[in-house]
Image: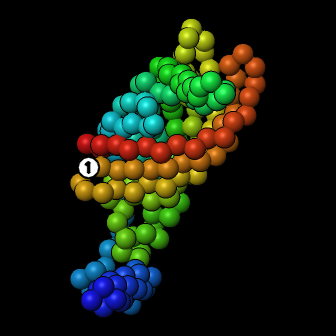
Amino acid sequence: MRRILLFFTAAICAINAEARRKPIEERPQDQITYTYKLRSNHSVSTTLLGLEYSFEGRVADRWTLIGRAGLVPNGFVLFSTPEKTSFIGNMGIGLTFETRWYSNIAKRAEYGRSTYNNSSDFISMRLRALTSDGELEVCFTPAYGIRRTFGKLWFHEITFGPRIGIADELFIAPHIQYRLGLAF
C-alpha cells in the first residue's frame, strides 16, 4: 500500500512540475496571468533575533526602495572551552535603506507563478547604520535574495552576499539572513 501511495504522490508531483515549466502560450486560457505589478507595502518582520518595521515603496517597473527601523542583531559568537560552551549575541537599534531590483518577476508571471506581494528573486544594495554599546557601525551589503509569500499576508526571504562595513576599523564579513514577515 505504501508503494502505491508513494508512486501516485511522485506521479502527481512530476505532472505538477511539468505544468509549471510550460510557457504561457501552451497553457489553457483560464491559467494565463498576463501582468505583474510590484506592490508598495508596510511590514513587520523578524530575523534570527531582531524585530523591524519596514515600508517598501515601488519606484519603477521592477525597482523598490525599502526603509527599515528596529532592533537588529549585530553579531554572534559561539565558543567552547573544556569547561563550558558559550554563546554571545549583540543587538542594537538599526536603520536600513535598501534598493531592490526584482530580477525574475516578469518570468514568474509568464509561467503563471505567483508574484503576489513581490514574490520573486531580487538583487539588492543595502545601507545600514547600527548603534550597539554606544558605538556606530555603518555597513554596505550587495546581496542576492529570494522572496516568497504564503497565505495572504506572510512572506519569507533569504539573502546572502558580502557585508562591507566600518565600526572601529574597516571589515568584510559574510551576510546570510533569513527573514519572516507579515505584510499589510
Q: Residue at x 70, y 23 (%)?
A: 166
Percent coordinates x, y for residue 54 in the rendering: 38, 34
> Residue at image x 30%, y 91%?
4
Residue picked out by circle 1: 153
Q: Residue at x 72, y 16 (%)?
A: 168
> Does residue 39 appear left or right of residue 126 in this picture?
left
Q: Is residue 140 left or right of residue 182?
A: right
Would residue 115 be visible to someone looking at this image?
yes
User: Which of 6 and 101 lies nearest the eye of the viewer?
Assistant: 6
In the image, residue 78 lies at what x, y percent? Answer: 60, 31
Residue 74 appearing in the image: no
Question: Could you tell me which secondary element the residue under label 1 belongs to?
Answer: loop
Residue 21: x %, y % from top left = 45, 82
Q: How is the image coloured?
A: rainbow
Question: Which residue is rendered at x = 66% and y = 40% of the image?
Answer: 174
Please, what is the three-letter code of the amino acid marked with disc 1?
Answer: Leu
Quarter of the image that includes the C terminus: top left
From this view, report whether residue 148 is shown above or below residue 100. below
